[in-house]
Image (spheres, helix red, strand yellow):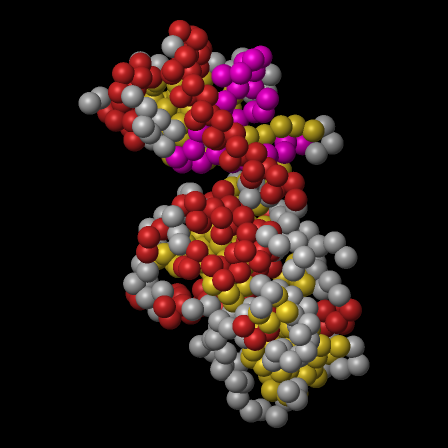
Amino acid sequence: MLPQLYRVQHVRDEMPDTFTLELEPQDGSAIPPFATGQFNMLYVFGVGEIPISISGDPAKRKPLVHTTRAVGTVSRAMRELKPENVVGVRGPFGSHWPIEHAMGKDIVIVTGGIGLAPLRSAMYQITAQREKYGKVALLYGARTPEDILYRKELENWRAHFDLEVYVTVDRATGKWRGSVGVVTRLIPRAPFDPQNTMALVCGPEIMMRFSAAELEKRGVAAGNIFVSMERNMKCAVGFCGHCQYGPNFVCKDGPVFQYSHVKDLLVKWEI
Amino acid sequence: MHTLELILAEHAFFKGLEPRYMQLITGCASNVRFDARTYIFREGEAAERFYLIREGKVALETFAAERGSIVIETIEAGEVLGWSWLFPPYQWHFSARVVEPTLAIALDGVCLRNKCEEDHDLGYQLVKRVAQIMMQRLQATRLQLLDVYSFRA
């Protein structure tokens, strides 16, 4: 429960309101291993602590990488951090993308906005063991062409002959030569065998709900769809109850859930 | 079976349609190709055809003086472009600009419309299929309107 001290190595702007933090343990010790989809609690001393998904490569032990959006008091303070500043880190916590169960299957990743951050780790893991999976498709939606996260990595993945990368934006002018339309429109276009597919979905909750419904319509079973939920996490170990989600705690039982376990909760307004 | 008839019969839009109708529809169909940066149709023109896109990408767009061209959505391989041929006033509401070189099957909407008037069973089948596409696009547009990636404090 005690935060470990990490030194800021680098703060990189991804977009005007989105940035990536690269951290290293202050005492030079090893960074604890993490599984893709897990999160850490990052503490800006004197301001507060927030959960952020790990977005780095699980095979590379340093640095510890998180991408987030400056939207609240803590994340805005985090945005102002400079190299050599020190933050507290607790974690990693929570469930992970069950990629180990996708061997021999097609994988379809459906993500939107900053939801790509927790799935970038998964993409690193999948591409490092590409031969273990069938078709791999990454479907990414952003608000506008200017809001595309990790643009260089998307371009790099798209250049691979064994990866299908589809990018769409919700709105664009005539200068944009890519796809326009919501990310769910990409699901019927993507090449995968719905009977033998694992789907990983991350983005705003409403986007995940519509995407999961579209995946089911295509024939992917609810048990083979995984979503990453977000709630107000405080303790991160299932004690405080802040992130209670029906019978689950998002910090402990999630953030990655089998869609079949939360499908009914997703349409309950009270939760 | 004629290649065009085979392609049409296997397309999701016509799947399950009786063979007698498929022959009739094939008679109203032709292969077309469009170069990038050309327009398949423009807003306000008479809507006399519709298209099954086989390859390429087409942007449905409109124009606002202060913003220039605005893309509503893109229509891509396997999808259907155009439904205004089926409903009065039979005019295009948006323009269709070719983003990537496009191969398509063009269907004569005026011919089909007349056949639908003569044979209401065919008319029902086509309206049902077009309504399905309209429903999917409407749902996608609603999600688009929600602007789900914007942050509101």
Residue B21 in the image, given as x and y percentages of width and height: 31, 17
Verify whether residue A167 appears in magenta.
no
Question: In the picture shown, does residue B71 fall above or below B24?
Answer: below
Q: Is residue B47 left or right of residue A18?
A: left
Which residue is at the front of the view, B49 or A51? A51
Q: Is residue A144 left or right of residue B106?
A: right
Question: In the picture shown, does residue A52 fall above or below A3?
Answer: above
Residue extending furthest toward the left? B1
Residue at position x 72%, y 72% from top? A78
Residue at position x 40%, y 36% from top? B77
Verify whether residue B89 appears in magenta.
yes
Which residue is at the front of the view, B14 or A117? B14
Residue A243 in the image, given as x and y percentages of width and height: 65, 70
Q: Quarter of the image holding residue A29?
A: bottom right
Tell me if I can see residue A128 in this picture: no
Q: Is residue B42 left or right of residue A72?
A: left
Question: In the picture shown, does residue B122 fall above or below B77?
Answer: above
Q: Tell me the magenta residue range.
A: B68-96
Residue A255 in the image, given as x and y percentages of width and height: 56, 68
Residue at position x 22%, y 21% from top? B2
Residue A142 in the image, given as x and y percentages of width and height: 59, 50
